Image (cartoon, grey):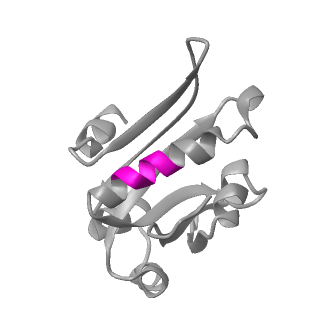
Amino acid sequence: MTRDILESVTEDTSCWIAICDGQVVGFTWGFRMSQEKLLAMVDMDVEAIRTMRLWCGEGQIAYQSELGVLEDYRKRGIARDLTSRRNEDFLQNGLEIGVIRTKENPPSVTYQWYQKIGYRVFYRYRDGSARVLMARQLAGLEF
C-alpha cells in the first residue's frame, strides 16, 4: 500500500487537512490517474470507461482517493470545504473528471454525499463488496 501511495504522489496531487484545536478532524487527497491505471486498478471492462466518458467527456481523470471527517465534526461543512479546495487544485492542474470509490449498499455517508452533488455510478465491483466507482465533471461543481 505504501508503494502505491508513493507512486501516486506527483506535482498535481492534492492533499488537504482540517484542524480544530490542534487536532486533525478531516482530510482529503487525490491525484491524476490514467485511464489505463483506472482500468487495471479494478479489472473493469472497457464498457464502464465508455459510460464514464459518455457522461463526463474525454478529460484527464482526478482519482479522489480519500475523504474523511471525524463523526463529531460532521455536518459543519468540513467535507464540502475540503473537497472544494481539492477540486480547485485538480482544475488548476488540468484534471477535469472526478472519480471516487465508495460503498453503495448499504449506502455509505460518502456515497450519499457524492450522489447529492451529482456523481453517478459507472462501475460496480464484481466481488460482492458493494463497492462502486462514481464520476462527474469537476467544472461547475457546486456544493
Is 88 within the magenta? yes
Q: Nearer the viewer, residue 112 or 125?
A: 112
Question: In the drawing, does residue 100 fall left or right of residue 10?
Answer: right
- At x 28%, y 45%, the residue is 8
Question: In the drawing, does residue 93 fall left or right of residue 23?
Answer: left
- At x 53%, y 42%, the residue is 82
Residue 109: x %, y % from top left: 73, 49
Is 69 within the magenta? no
The quadrant in which the N terminus is found is top left
- Furthest-left residue in view? 11
Image height of 109 relative to 69, above or below: below
Q: Nearer the viewer, residue 104 or 15?
A: 15
| Magenta span main SS | helix
- At x 62%, y 70%, the residue is 118
Residue 117: x %, y % from top left: 64, 64
Residue 37: x %, y % from top left: 30, 62
- At x 45%, y 63%, the residue is 98
* Stretch of the chain drawn in magenta: 84-89
Quarter of image, res 139? bottom left
The mark tally for this picture is 0
Question: In the drawing, does residue 10 fall left or right of residue 118?
Answer: left
The quadrant in which the C terminus is found is bottom right
Residue 39: x %, y % from top left: 36, 68
Image height of 141 relative to 70, above or below: below
Image height of 106 relative to 75, above or below: below
Quarter of image, res 132? bottom right
Question: In the drawing, does residue 28 fall left or right of residue 12?
Answer: right
Image height of 18 relative to 127, above or below: above
